Image (tube, grey):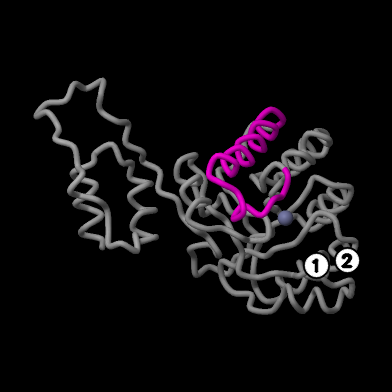
C-alpha cells in the first residue's frame, strides 16, 4: 500500500504530502489509488502551475513524545464561568495548561480568553459549537474549525494549531480536514472523567490512573468538582516527581 501510495504521489504531484499521508493511513478498500487515471504531464510544467507542496504532516497525539516525567494539563469546553477559578489554581501552583476553547464560548467571553493567555496558558481549537465531527461532512467540519479559530485569533496573539475533536470522536474526514488546514489532532491518554462524576475522590483517582511520562490529562472548564480536584491532583503528580508542561513545549 505504501508503495502504491508513493507511486500515486509521483504520478499525481498535485496531491499534497498531507493528503498522501491520509491516503496511507486509510487504505482504499479497493486496493489503492487509481494510478491508471494519472494524467500525462508536460516534461517541464510552468512554475506557476506547480502545486504548492505542504510541509505540514498531521499528527494524532495522545501523549507527548518524551520519556521525561512531564504531564500536560488540558481543559476543554471553555471559556466558561469556572475558567477564572481554574486559572487562580494554576497561578497559585505555578502550573501551565492548554485550554481547548469553543468558539461560541470565546465569542461571549473575550475577557476570559485574554485572562487565559495572560496567565501563561495556551489556547487551541475545540470547534465552534461542540458537534460530533464524525456526523458532519468535510465542509462542515472545516467550517466548525475555522469559525472557532477566527474568533480565537481575533482575541489572542497566538492560537496553537491543535484540534481536539468533541467527545474525542474523529475519522478519516476529520483527519483530512486537519491535514488541509494545518492542525494536529490532540487527544489525551488520561481522562479525569470530571464530566461524569461529582465525587472528588473518584475524579482524583481517575486522573491519576495510568499517568506516565508525557501524559496528556483531560479536565473540563465547567464542572465544580474540577476545582476541588485540581490542587490535589497537581500536588499528587508533583509528589511522584513530575512537572507540568505545555503541549507546545513538545508539539509544533
Ligand atoms: Zn468538549
Provide residue 227's location: percent of width, then percent of height.
87, 61
Q: Badge 2 is on which residue?
A: 225
Looking at the image, can residue 187 be seen? yes
Residue located beneath label 1 in the image: 194
SS state under label 2: helix
In the rendering, at what x and y percent does residue 42 appear? 12, 28
Determine whether 162 is above or below 151 in the image. below
Q: Position of residue 160 (x, y in %)?
A: 59, 42
- Is 132 covered by the magenta stretch? yes
At 19% across and 42% down in the image, what residue appears?
38
Question: What residue is rendered at 19% in x and 45% in y?
Answer: 10
Give the magenta part as a residue range. Answer: 129-155
Left or right: 6 as drawn, with respect to 167: left
Q: Name the element at disc 1.
A: loop
Q: Is residue 46 magenta?
A: no
Asked if the residue at label 2 sits under 8 Å from ligand 1, the reply is no
Q: Residue at x 30, y 62 (%)?
A: 30
- CB under 8 Å between discs 2 and 1: yes
**Residue nearest the viewer, comparing 108 with 75:** 108
* Residue 199 location, quadrant: bottom right
As drawn, the label of residue 142 is none
How far apart are labels 2 and 1 at the CA level?
7 Å
Where is residue 85? Give x, y as percent: 88, 52
Which residue is at 25% across, 23% downward? 49
Amino acid at each position: 500500500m505504501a508503495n502504491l501510495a508513493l507511486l500515486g504521489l509521483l504520478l499525481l504531484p498535485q496531491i499534497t504530502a498531507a493528503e498522501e499521508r491520509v491516503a496511507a493511513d486509510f487504505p482504499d478498500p479497493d486496493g489503492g489509488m487509481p494510478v491508471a487515471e494519472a494524467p500525462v504531464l508536460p516534461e517541464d510544467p510552468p512554475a506557476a502551475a506547480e502545486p504548492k507542496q505542504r510541509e505540514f504532516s498531521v499528527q494524532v497525539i495522545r501523549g507527548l513524545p518524551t520519556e521525561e516525567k512531564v504531564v500536560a494539563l488540558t481543559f476543554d469546553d471553555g471559556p466558561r464561568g469556572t475558567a477564572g477559578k481554574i486559572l487562580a489554581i494554576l497561578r497559585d501552583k505555578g502550573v501551565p495548561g492548554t485550554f481547548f476553547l469553543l468558539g461560541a464560548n470565546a465569542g461571549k467571553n473575550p475577557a476570559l480568553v485574554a485572562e487565559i493567555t495572560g496567565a501563561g496558558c495556551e489556547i487551541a481549537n475545540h470547534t465552534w459549537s461542540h458537534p460530533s465531527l464524525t456526523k458532519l461532512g468535510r465542509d462542515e467540519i472545516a467550517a466548525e474549525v475555522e469559525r472557532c479559530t477566527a474568533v480565537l485569533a481575533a482575541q489572542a496573539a497566538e492560537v496553537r494549531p491543535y484540534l481536539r475533536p468533541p467527545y474525542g470522536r474523529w475519522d478519516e474526514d476529520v483527519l483530512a480536514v486537519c491535514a488541509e488546514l494545518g492542525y494536529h489532532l490532540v487527544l489525551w491518554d488520561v481522562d479525569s472523567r470530571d464530566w461524569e462524576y461529582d465525587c472528588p475522590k473518584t475524579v482524583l483517582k481517575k486522573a491519576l490512573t495510568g499517568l506516565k511520562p508525557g501524559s496528556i490529562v483531560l479536565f473540563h472548564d465547567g464542572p465544580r468538582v474540577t476545582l476541588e480536584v485540581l490542587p490535589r491532583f497537581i500536588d499528587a503528580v508533583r509528589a511522584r516527581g513530575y512537572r507540568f508542561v505545555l503541549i507546545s513545549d513538545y508539539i509544533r
